[in-house]
Amino acid sequence: MDTNELTNLLSEKFQFASFRLGQEEAIQETLKGNDTLVLLPTGSGKSVCYQMAGYALGGLTVIVSPLLSLMHDQVEKMKQQGEKRVVALNSMLTYQEKTAILKRLSAYQFIFISPEMLLQENVLRKFRQENISLFVIDEAHCISQWGIDFRPEYLSLGTVRSKLGFPTTMALTATATEAIQQDIKTVLGMKKETTSEIVYSMDRPEIELMTEICQRDKDERIINYVNYLQKPGIIYFSSKKMAQSVSKMLKDKTDLAVEVYHADVPSEDKVKIQQQFLDDELQVICATSAFGMGVDKQNIRFVIHYHLPANPESYLQEIGRCARDGKASLAILLYEPGDERIPLYLQADNFPSKEIIHQIYMERKIPHALIENVQAQVGWYYFSNHFTLEEAYDRVDQYSETKQQQLQFMLDFIRTADCKRKTLLAYFDETIKSNSNGCCSSCNEQLIAHFKETKMVKSKATVNENWQFVMKKLLKL
DNA sequence: CGTTATAGTGCTAGCACTATAACGGTGCCCTAGT
Protein backbone atom coordinates (compact mmCIF):
# COMPACT_ATOMS: atom_id res chain seq x y z
CA MET A 1 0.00 0.00 0.00
CA ASP A 2 1.47 3.37 -0.94
CA THR A 3 1.50 6.48 1.20
CA ASN A 4 -1.58 7.91 -0.47
CA GLU A 5 -3.68 4.83 0.08
CA LEU A 6 -2.56 4.59 3.68
CA THR A 7 -3.27 8.25 4.31
CA ASN A 8 -6.73 7.85 2.82
CA LEU A 9 -7.36 4.88 5.07
CA LEU A 10 -6.14 6.94 8.03
CA SER A 11 -8.57 9.73 7.33
CA GLU A 12 -11.40 7.28 6.69
CA LYS A 13 -10.86 5.38 9.95
CA PHE A 14 -9.51 8.06 12.26
CA GLN A 15 -10.27 11.39 10.58
CA PHE A 16 -6.59 12.30 10.81
CA ALA A 17 -5.10 14.16 7.85
CA SER A 18 -1.60 12.80 8.25
CA PHE A 19 0.55 10.36 10.19
CA ARG A 20 2.63 11.31 13.18
CA LEU A 21 6.27 10.53 13.54
CA GLY A 22 7.07 6.85 13.06
CA GLN A 23 3.52 5.64 12.53
CA GLU A 24 3.59 5.10 8.79
CA GLU A 25 7.00 3.49 8.95
CA ALA A 26 5.79 0.99 11.54
CA ILE A 27 2.72 0.17 9.46
CA GLN A 28 4.68 -0.22 6.21
CA GLU A 29 7.15 -2.62 7.84
CA THR A 30 4.25 -4.71 9.09
CA LEU A 31 2.66 -4.75 5.65
CA LYS A 32 5.90 -6.12 4.26
CA GLY A 33 5.41 -9.02 6.62
CA ASN A 34 8.18 -8.04 9.01
CA ASP A 35 7.87 -8.28 12.75
CA THR A 36 8.32 -4.86 14.29
CA LEU A 37 9.43 -3.50 17.59
CA VAL A 38 7.96 -0.01 17.82
CA LEU A 39 9.45 2.45 20.26
CA LEU A 40 7.67 5.75 20.22
CA PRO A 41 7.46 8.26 23.05
CA THR A 42 4.52 8.25 25.48
CA GLY A 43 1.40 9.74 23.98
CA SER A 44 2.57 9.58 20.37
CA GLY A 45 -0.30 7.49 19.03
CA LYS A 46 0.93 3.93 19.20
CA SER A 47 -2.57 2.46 19.02
CA VAL A 48 -2.99 4.07 15.60
CA CYS A 49 0.01 2.00 14.45
CA TYR A 50 -1.48 -1.39 15.16
CA GLN A 51 -5.05 -0.46 14.35
CA MET A 52 -4.05 0.94 10.96
CA ALA A 53 -1.83 -2.06 10.27
CA GLY A 54 -4.77 -4.28 11.18
CA TYR A 55 -7.09 -2.46 8.81
CA ALA A 56 -4.55 -2.46 6.02
CA LEU A 57 -3.86 -6.17 6.38
CA GLY A 58 -7.47 -7.21 6.84
CA GLY A 59 -8.32 -10.40 8.72
CA LEU A 60 -7.94 -10.90 12.44
CA THR A 61 -5.76 -8.74 14.70
CA VAL A 62 -5.11 -10.04 18.21
CA ILE A 63 -3.90 -7.48 20.73
CA VAL A 64 -2.31 -8.65 23.97
CA SER A 65 -3.02 -5.98 26.55
CA PRO A 66 -1.95 -5.87 30.21
CA LEU A 67 -5.00 -4.34 31.88
CA LEU A 68 -8.74 -4.88 31.77
CA SER A 69 -9.36 -1.15 31.97
CA LEU A 70 -6.98 -0.52 29.10
CA MET A 71 -8.74 -3.09 26.93
CA HIS A 72 -12.07 -1.62 27.82
CA ASP A 73 -10.98 1.91 26.93
CA GLN A 74 -9.48 0.85 23.61
CA VAL A 75 -12.59 -1.11 22.65
CA GLU A 76 -14.84 1.81 23.55
CA LYS A 77 -12.69 4.22 21.59
CA MET A 78 -12.75 1.98 18.53
CA LYS A 79 -16.50 1.54 18.80
CA GLN A 80 -16.86 5.31 18.89
CA GLN A 81 -14.84 5.45 15.70
CA GLY A 82 -17.48 3.21 14.19
CA GLU A 83 -15.73 -0.16 14.47
CA LYS A 84 -18.23 -2.89 15.24
CA ARG A 85 -16.00 -5.95 14.92
CA VAL A 86 -14.00 -5.30 18.07
CA VAL A 87 -14.17 -7.04 21.44
CA ALA A 88 -12.24 -7.58 24.66
CA LEU A 89 -12.00 -11.21 25.67
CA ASN A 90 -11.46 -11.33 29.43
CA SER A 91 -12.82 -12.25 32.83
CA MET A 92 -15.30 -9.39 32.79
CA LEU A 93 -17.43 -11.46 30.43
CA THR A 94 -19.88 -14.11 31.54
CA TYR A 95 -19.11 -17.67 30.61
CA GLN A 96 -21.79 -17.56 27.94
CA GLU A 97 -20.42 -14.38 26.38
CA LYS A 98 -16.93 -15.83 26.41
CA THR A 99 -17.89 -19.08 24.69
CA ALA A 100 -20.00 -17.21 22.19
CA ILE A 101 -17.01 -15.11 21.17
CA LEU A 102 -14.66 -18.09 21.08
CA LYS A 103 -17.05 -19.92 18.77
CA ARG A 104 -17.00 -17.12 16.24
CA LEU A 105 -13.56 -15.54 16.48
CA SER A 106 -13.52 -14.77 12.78
CA ALA A 107 -16.55 -12.52 13.22
CA TYR A 108 -14.17 -10.00 14.73
CA GLN A 109 -11.39 -7.94 13.27
CA PHE A 110 -9.83 -6.79 16.55
CA ILE A 111 -9.69 -8.90 19.70
CA PHE A 112 -8.11 -7.58 22.87
CA ILE A 113 -6.95 -10.22 25.35
CA SER A 114 -4.77 -10.61 28.43
CA PRO A 115 -1.76 -12.93 28.33
CA GLU A 116 -3.32 -15.03 31.07
CA MET A 117 -6.50 -15.58 29.09
CA LEU A 118 -4.65 -16.27 25.87
CA LEU A 119 -2.58 -18.94 27.59
CA GLN A 120 -5.59 -20.95 28.67
CA GLU A 121 -5.57 -24.12 26.72
CA ASN A 122 -9.11 -24.01 25.35
CA VAL A 123 -8.68 -20.36 24.39
CA LEU A 124 -5.37 -20.88 22.65
CA ARG A 125 -6.79 -23.88 20.79
CA LYS A 126 -9.54 -21.69 19.32
CA PHE A 127 -7.05 -19.08 18.22
CA ARG A 128 -4.87 -21.74 16.60
CA GLN A 129 -7.73 -22.57 14.29
CA GLU A 130 -7.78 -18.99 13.02
CA ASN A 131 -5.62 -17.20 10.57
CA ILE A 132 -4.15 -14.35 12.54
CA SER A 133 -3.08 -11.45 10.33
CA LEU A 134 -1.46 -9.45 13.09
CA PHE A 135 -0.36 -10.26 16.62
CA VAL A 136 0.16 -7.19 18.78
CA ILE A 137 1.87 -6.83 22.13
CA ASP A 138 0.81 -3.51 23.57
CA GLU A 139 2.93 -2.05 26.41
CA ALA A 140 5.60 -4.57 25.51
CA HIS A 141 7.93 -3.44 28.29
CA CYS A 142 5.64 -5.45 30.58
CA ILE A 143 7.39 -8.55 29.26
CA SER A 144 10.58 -7.40 30.86
CA GLN A 145 9.17 -5.45 33.74
CA TRP A 146 6.48 -7.84 34.94
CA GLY A 147 7.36 -11.11 33.31
CA ILE A 148 9.51 -12.89 35.73
CA ASP A 149 8.20 -12.19 39.20
CA PHE A 150 4.78 -10.67 38.76
CA ARG A 151 2.93 -11.93 35.72
CA PRO A 152 4.89 -14.90 34.47
CA GLU A 153 2.46 -15.51 31.59
CA TYR A 154 4.18 -12.63 29.85
CA LEU A 155 7.21 -14.85 29.43
CA SER A 156 5.19 -17.48 27.61
CA LEU A 157 4.09 -15.18 24.80
CA GLY A 158 6.91 -16.55 22.66
CA THR A 159 5.49 -20.04 23.01
CA VAL A 160 2.06 -18.70 22.19
CA ARG A 161 3.45 -17.04 19.11
CA SER A 162 5.00 -20.25 17.87
CA LYS A 163 1.81 -22.21 18.56
CA LEU A 164 -0.06 -19.64 16.49
CA GLY A 165 2.37 -20.27 13.64
CA PHE A 166 4.44 -17.10 14.06
CA PRO A 167 1.93 -14.51 12.90
CA THR A 168 3.30 -11.10 11.92
CA THR A 169 3.95 -9.40 15.21
CA MET A 170 4.08 -5.83 16.37
CA ALA A 171 5.40 -5.05 19.86
CA LEU A 172 4.96 -1.48 21.08
CA THR A 173 6.33 0.47 24.01
CA ALA A 174 7.44 3.94 25.04
CA THR A 175 10.28 2.98 27.33
CA ALA A 176 12.91 0.39 26.64
CA THR A 177 16.66 0.41 26.91
CA GLU A 178 18.75 -1.53 24.42
CA ALA A 179 18.77 -4.44 26.88
CA ILE A 180 15.00 -4.44 27.31
CA GLN A 181 14.48 -4.25 23.55
CA GLN A 182 16.65 -7.33 23.26
CA ASP A 183 14.72 -8.99 26.04
CA ILE A 184 11.41 -8.37 24.29
CA LYS A 185 12.71 -9.82 21.03
CA THR A 186 14.17 -12.85 22.76
CA VAL A 187 11.04 -13.64 24.76
CA LEU A 188 8.81 -13.24 21.71
CA GLY A 189 11.20 -15.19 19.52
CA MET A 190 11.47 -12.38 16.96
CA LYS A 191 14.21 -13.25 14.50
CA LYS A 192 16.87 -10.81 13.51
CA GLU A 193 16.41 -11.20 9.74
CA THR A 194 12.67 -10.53 9.79
CA THR A 195 12.44 -7.95 12.54
CA SER A 196 12.45 -4.20 12.01
CA GLU A 197 12.91 -1.77 14.83
CA ILE A 198 11.18 1.55 14.65
CA VAL A 199 12.96 3.53 17.33
CA TYR A 200 12.40 7.21 17.94
CA SER A 201 13.61 9.44 20.71
CA MET A 202 11.96 8.78 24.03
CA ASP A 203 12.38 12.42 24.92
CA ARG A 204 9.36 14.54 25.70
CA PRO A 205 10.80 18.03 25.33
CA GLU A 206 7.62 19.71 26.54
CA ILE A 207 8.04 18.13 29.97
CA GLU A 208 10.44 20.12 32.12
CA LEU A 209 12.32 18.07 34.66
CA MET A 210 12.98 19.12 38.20
CA THR A 211 14.42 17.31 41.18
CA GLU A 212 14.57 18.49 44.76
CA ILE A 213 16.28 17.22 47.85
CA CYS A 214 13.99 17.59 50.83
CA GLN A 215 14.52 17.59 54.56
CA ARG A 216 11.32 16.43 56.22
CA ASP A 217 9.35 19.11 54.46
CA LYS A 218 7.74 17.20 51.61
CA ASP A 219 4.18 17.72 52.82
CA GLU A 220 4.66 21.43 53.02
CA ARG A 221 6.18 21.52 49.56
CA ILE A 222 3.39 19.39 48.14
CA ILE A 223 0.72 21.72 49.50
CA ASN A 224 2.50 24.69 48.04
CA TYR A 225 3.07 23.07 44.69
CA VAL A 226 -0.47 21.91 44.19
CA ASN A 227 -1.73 25.37 45.04
CA TYR A 228 0.80 27.11 42.87
CA LEU A 229 0.92 24.92 39.78
CA GLN A 230 -1.49 24.69 36.91
CA LYS A 231 -3.68 21.64 37.26
CA PRO A 232 -4.65 18.87 36.83
CA GLY A 233 -1.75 16.79 38.05
CA ILE A 234 -0.69 13.44 39.44
CA ILE A 235 1.34 12.77 42.58
CA TYR A 236 3.04 9.38 42.64
CA PHE A 237 3.91 7.45 45.80
CA SER A 238 5.70 4.19 46.50
CA SER A 239 3.34 3.33 49.31
CA LYS A 240 -0.41 3.10 49.46
CA LYS A 241 -0.46 4.43 52.98
CA MET A 242 1.39 7.60 52.09
CA ALA A 243 -0.78 8.15 49.02
CA GLN A 244 -3.78 7.87 51.30
CA SER A 245 -2.50 10.17 53.99
CA VAL A 246 -1.21 12.89 51.69
CA SER A 247 -4.49 12.78 49.81
CA LYS A 248 -6.32 13.34 53.06
CA MET A 249 -3.97 16.13 54.02
CA LEU A 250 -4.53 17.89 50.70
CA LYS A 251 -8.29 17.58 51.10
CA ASP A 252 -8.02 19.15 54.54
CA LYS A 253 -5.57 21.88 53.78
CA THR A 254 -6.49 22.98 50.28
CA ASP A 255 -9.73 23.63 48.43
CA LEU A 256 -8.79 21.28 45.63
CA ALA A 257 -10.65 18.20 44.46
CA VAL A 258 -8.25 15.39 45.36
CA GLU A 259 -8.62 11.62 45.26
CA VAL A 260 -6.45 8.63 46.03
CA TYR A 261 -5.84 5.69 43.69
CA HIS A 262 -4.03 2.44 44.46
CA ALA A 263 -4.49 -1.30 44.24
CA ASP A 264 -6.65 -1.52 47.37
CA VAL A 265 -9.19 1.02 46.21
CA PRO A 266 -12.34 -0.95 45.32
CA SER A 267 -12.61 -1.34 41.57
CA GLU A 268 -15.88 0.60 41.23
CA ASP A 269 -14.18 3.55 42.89
CA LYS A 270 -11.14 3.17 40.66
CA VAL A 271 -13.30 3.42 37.57
CA LYS A 272 -15.17 6.39 39.01
CA ILE A 273 -12.02 8.23 40.07
CA GLN A 274 -10.29 7.70 36.75
CA GLN A 275 -13.39 8.95 34.92
CA GLN A 276 -13.70 12.01 37.15
CA PHE A 277 -10.06 12.79 36.54
CA LEU A 278 -10.52 12.45 32.79
CA ASP A 279 -13.56 14.73 32.97
CA ASP A 280 -11.60 17.43 34.84
CA GLU A 281 -13.68 16.95 37.96
CA LEU A 282 -10.59 16.13 39.97
CA GLN A 283 -7.56 18.36 40.05
CA VAL A 284 -5.10 16.09 41.79
CA ILE A 285 -4.72 12.31 42.01
CA CYS A 286 -2.55 10.78 44.71
CA ALA A 287 -1.56 7.42 43.30
CA THR A 288 0.78 4.47 43.37
CA SER A 289 2.07 2.91 40.19
CA ALA A 290 -1.36 1.30 39.86
CA PHE A 291 -2.57 4.48 38.21
CA GLY A 292 -1.82 5.67 34.75
CA MET A 293 -1.16 2.98 32.21
CA GLY A 294 -3.45 3.78 29.31
CA VAL A 295 -4.65 7.02 30.86
CA ASP A 296 -4.75 9.17 27.78
CA LYS A 297 -5.57 12.60 29.13
CA GLN A 298 -4.37 15.56 27.14
CA ASN A 299 -4.08 18.34 29.68
CA ILE A 300 -2.19 16.92 32.66
CA ARG A 301 0.11 19.76 33.67
CA PHE A 302 2.32 18.20 36.32
CA VAL A 303 3.53 14.90 37.71
CA ILE A 304 5.09 15.03 41.14
CA HIS A 305 6.99 12.08 42.58
CA TYR A 306 6.68 12.06 46.34
CA HIS A 307 8.91 9.00 46.42
CA LEU A 308 11.59 8.05 44.00
CA PRO A 309 10.65 5.56 41.29
CA ALA A 310 12.63 2.32 41.37
CA ASN A 311 14.00 2.76 37.87
CA PRO A 312 14.28 5.24 35.01
CA GLU A 313 11.77 3.27 32.93
CA SER A 314 9.00 3.77 35.48
CA TYR A 315 10.01 7.39 35.90
CA LEU A 316 9.77 8.05 32.17
CA GLN A 317 6.45 6.21 31.90
CA GLU A 318 4.98 8.15 34.80
CA ILE A 319 6.13 11.63 33.83
CA GLY A 320 5.09 10.79 30.27
CA ARG A 321 1.47 11.01 31.35
CA CYS A 322 1.56 14.79 31.35
CA ALA A 323 1.75 17.22 28.47
CA ARG A 324 0.03 15.04 25.89
CA ASP A 325 -1.44 18.20 24.38
CA GLY A 326 2.11 19.34 23.75
CA LYS A 327 1.93 22.27 26.15
CA ALA A 328 4.71 22.83 28.66
CA SER A 329 4.32 20.73 31.79
CA LEU A 330 6.38 20.02 34.85
CA ALA A 331 7.77 16.86 36.42
CA ILE A 332 9.00 17.28 39.97
CA LEU A 333 10.86 14.52 41.77
CA LEU A 334 11.09 14.97 45.52
CA TYR A 335 13.77 13.03 47.30
CA GLU A 336 14.67 12.74 50.93
CA PRO A 337 17.78 10.82 51.90
CA GLY A 338 16.65 7.32 52.83
CA ASP A 339 13.81 7.17 50.30
CA GLU A 340 15.66 4.44 48.45
CA ARG A 341 14.73 2.05 51.24
CA ILE A 342 11.29 1.27 49.84
CA PRO A 343 12.46 0.27 46.34
CA LEU A 344 15.37 -1.60 47.90
CA TYR A 345 13.04 -3.55 50.10
CA LEU A 346 10.54 -4.24 47.34
CA GLN A 347 13.26 -5.42 45.05
CA ALA A 348 14.60 -7.87 47.62
CA ASP A 349 11.12 -9.03 48.46
CA ASN A 350 10.13 -10.76 45.28
CA PHE A 351 13.33 -12.28 44.12
CA PRO A 352 14.44 -15.63 45.48
CA SER A 353 17.53 -16.08 47.59
CA LYS A 354 20.08 -18.65 46.49
CA GLU A 355 18.94 -20.79 49.42
CA ILE A 356 15.43 -21.01 48.02
CA ILE A 357 16.70 -21.80 44.53
CA HIS A 358 19.02 -24.44 45.89
CA GLN A 359 16.19 -26.00 47.84
CA ILE A 360 13.94 -26.14 44.76
CA TYR A 361 16.70 -27.71 42.66
CA MET A 362 17.40 -30.31 45.36
CA GLU A 363 13.79 -31.26 45.95
CA ARG A 364 12.88 -30.86 42.26
CA LYS A 365 9.66 -29.20 43.36
CA ILE A 366 8.52 -26.18 45.31
CA PRO A 367 8.83 -27.02 49.01
CA HIS A 368 5.40 -27.22 50.56
CA ALA A 369 6.02 -24.32 52.93
CA LEU A 370 6.84 -22.05 49.99
CA ILE A 371 3.95 -22.97 47.75
CA GLU A 372 2.36 -19.51 48.01
CA ASN A 373 5.68 -17.72 47.82
CA VAL A 374 6.34 -15.51 44.78
CA GLN A 375 10.07 -16.00 45.14
CA ALA A 376 9.66 -19.73 44.95
CA GLN A 377 7.64 -19.31 41.74
CA VAL A 378 10.59 -17.54 40.17
CA GLY A 379 12.90 -20.35 41.25
CA TRP A 380 10.47 -22.85 39.85
CA TYR A 381 10.42 -20.98 36.55
CA TYR A 382 14.19 -21.45 36.28
CA PHE A 383 14.00 -25.09 37.21
CA SER A 384 11.14 -25.98 34.91
CA ASN A 385 12.75 -24.11 32.01
CA HIS A 386 15.87 -26.23 32.38
CA PHE A 387 18.21 -23.56 33.66
CA THR A 388 21.16 -25.20 35.39
CA LEU A 389 21.62 -24.26 39.01
CA GLU A 390 24.54 -22.04 38.02
CA GLU A 391 22.47 -20.29 35.37
CA ALA A 392 19.70 -19.72 37.88
CA TYR A 393 22.20 -18.23 40.34
CA ASP A 394 23.57 -16.04 37.56
CA ARG A 395 20.11 -14.79 36.72
CA VAL A 396 19.45 -13.83 40.31
CA ASP A 397 22.78 -12.04 40.55
CA GLN A 398 22.19 -10.27 37.27
CA TYR A 399 18.72 -9.28 38.30
CA SER A 400 19.74 -7.79 41.58
CA GLU A 401 22.70 -6.04 40.01
CA THR A 402 20.46 -4.48 37.38
CA LYS A 403 17.99 -3.33 40.01
CA GLN A 404 20.83 -1.89 42.03
CA GLN A 405 22.17 0.01 39.03
CA GLN A 406 18.75 1.36 38.15
CA LEU A 407 18.25 2.66 41.64
CA GLN A 408 21.73 4.11 41.69
CA PHE A 409 20.96 5.82 38.41
CA MET A 410 17.92 7.47 39.94
CA LEU A 411 19.99 8.71 42.87
CA ASP A 412 22.62 10.10 40.52
CA PHE A 413 19.91 11.66 38.40
CA ILE A 414 18.53 13.49 41.41
CA ARG A 415 21.90 14.81 42.50
CA THR A 416 23.57 15.58 39.21
CA ALA A 417 24.26 19.21 38.39
CA ASP A 418 24.48 18.14 34.76
CA CYS A 419 21.42 18.47 32.53
CA LYS A 420 18.69 16.10 33.81
CA ARG A 421 17.27 15.47 30.38
CA LYS A 422 20.64 14.62 28.94
CA THR A 423 21.32 12.33 31.89
CA LEU A 424 17.96 10.55 31.67
CA LEU A 425 18.16 10.01 27.92
CA ALA A 426 21.73 8.80 28.16
CA TYR A 427 20.34 5.90 30.17
CA PHE A 428 18.28 5.01 27.11
CA ASP A 429 21.38 5.32 24.94
CA GLU A 430 20.27 8.61 23.48
CA THR A 431 22.41 11.67 23.05
CA ILE A 432 20.72 15.03 23.09
CA LYS A 433 21.78 18.60 23.30
CA SER A 434 20.54 20.29 26.42
CA ASN A 435 18.43 23.35 26.10
CA SER A 436 19.25 26.09 28.56
CA ASN A 437 15.69 27.33 28.85
CA GLY A 438 12.84 25.28 30.22
CA CYS A 439 14.70 22.00 30.18
CA CYS A 440 15.39 20.97 33.71
CA SER A 441 16.30 22.23 37.14
CA SER A 442 20.00 22.01 36.31
CA CYS A 443 19.68 24.11 33.19
CA ASN A 444 17.29 26.65 34.66
CA GLU A 445 17.06 27.21 38.39
CA GLN A 446 13.87 29.20 38.12
CA LEU A 447 12.05 26.59 36.13
CA ILE A 448 8.99 26.59 38.31
CA ALA A 449 8.22 30.25 37.65
CA HIS A 450 6.68 29.34 34.26
CA PHE A 451 4.05 27.19 35.83
CA LYS A 452 2.14 29.50 38.06
CA GLU A 453 -1.60 28.95 38.08
CA THR A 454 -3.08 32.04 36.43
CA LYS A 455 -6.40 31.86 38.22
CA MET A 456 -6.33 32.94 41.83
CA VAL A 457 -6.56 29.88 43.97
CA LYS A 458 -8.31 30.30 47.25
CA SER A 459 -6.18 28.85 49.94
CA LYS A 460 -6.11 28.98 53.65
CA ALA A 461 -4.03 31.56 55.42
CA THR A 462 -1.46 29.22 56.91
CA VAL A 463 -0.81 27.75 53.51
CA ASN A 464 -0.20 31.17 52.02
CA GLU A 465 2.28 32.14 54.67
CA ASN A 466 4.27 29.00 54.21
CA TRP A 467 4.05 29.33 50.55
CA GLN A 468 5.50 32.79 50.33
CA PHE A 469 8.36 31.64 52.45
CA VAL A 470 9.06 28.57 50.37
CA MET A 471 8.70 30.43 47.10
CA LYS A 472 11.22 33.01 48.20
CA LYS A 473 13.60 30.26 49.07
CA LEU A 474 12.99 28.41 45.82
CA LEU A 475 13.36 31.41 43.63
CA LYS A 476 16.25 32.69 45.70
CA LEU A 477 14.61 36.06 46.19
C1' DC B 1 16.96 -0.93 56.16
C1' DG B 2 14.98 2.64 59.14
C1' DT B 3 10.89 4.80 60.64
C1' DT B 4 6.67 4.42 63.16
C1' DA B 5 3.26 2.05 66.01
C1' DT B 6 2.31 -0.74 69.77
C1' DA B 7 3.29 -3.23 73.92
C1' DG B 8 5.77 -3.60 78.00
C1' DT B 9 8.47 -1.81 82.09
C1' DG B 10 9.09 0.90 86.11
C1' DC B 11 8.72 4.41 89.52
C1' DT B 12 7.57 9.70 88.94
C1' DA B 13 0.48 4.93 89.62
C1' DG B 14 0.15 8.41 85.06
C1' DC B 15 3.78 9.40 82.51
C1' DA B 16 8.68 8.60 80.57
C1' DC B 17 11.30 5.42 78.90
C1' DT B 18 12.71 1.12 76.24
C1' DA B 19 11.94 -3.23 73.64
C1' DT B 20 9.73 -5.35 69.98
C1' DA B 21 6.94 -5.71 65.81
C1' DA B 22 5.14 -4.10 61.53
C1' DC B 23 5.58 -1.89 57.25
C1' DG B 24 7.05 -0.78 52.23
C1' DG B 25 4.29 -1.83 44.55
C1' DT B 26 2.23 -3.52 40.17
C1' DG B 27 -3.02 -7.77 38.03
C1' DC B 28 -4.53 -11.25 35.53
C1' DC B 29 -7.47 -15.51 36.44
C1' DC B 30 -10.66 -18.94 38.87
C1' DT B 31 -17.71 -22.25 38.74
C1' DA B 32 -19.01 -25.67 32.92
C1' DG B 33 -17.51 -29.20 28.76
C1' DT B 34 -15.52 -32.47 22.97
Image: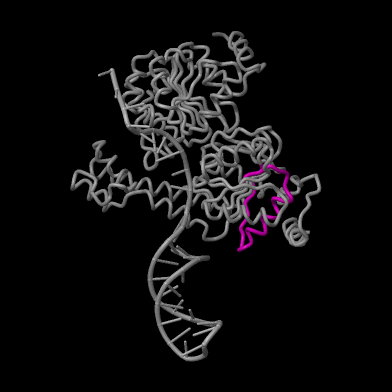
Q: Residue at x 59, y 11 (%)?
A: A9
Q: Which residues are magenta?
A: A208-234
Q: Quadrant of residue A296?
A: top right
**Dividing the image into 4 quarters, which one contains the C terminus of chain A?**
bottom right
Q: Which x, y percent locates residue A15?
A: 65, 16
Say left or right for A292 vs A253.
left
Is residue A93 shown in magenta? no
- Check the image and report above or below for A123 versus A451: above
Q: Nearer the viewer, residue A443 or A111?
A: A111
Q: Which x, y percent locates residue A212?
A: 63, 55
Q: Which x, y percent locates residue A377?
A: 31, 43
- Check the image and report above or below for A361 versus A47: below
- Check the image and report above or below for A29 versus A172: above
Is residue A209 shown in magenta? yes
Q: Which x, y percent locates residue A41?
A: 57, 32
Say left or right for A28 vs A144.
right
**Dividing the image into 4 quarters, which one contains the N terminus of chain A?**
top right
Say left or right for A351 vs A18.
left
Q: Nearer the viewer, residue A308 or A22?
A: A308
Q: Residue at x 48, y 17 (%)?
A: A30
- Check the image and report above or below for A12 versus A340: above
Q: Residue at x 48, y 34 (%)?
A: A67
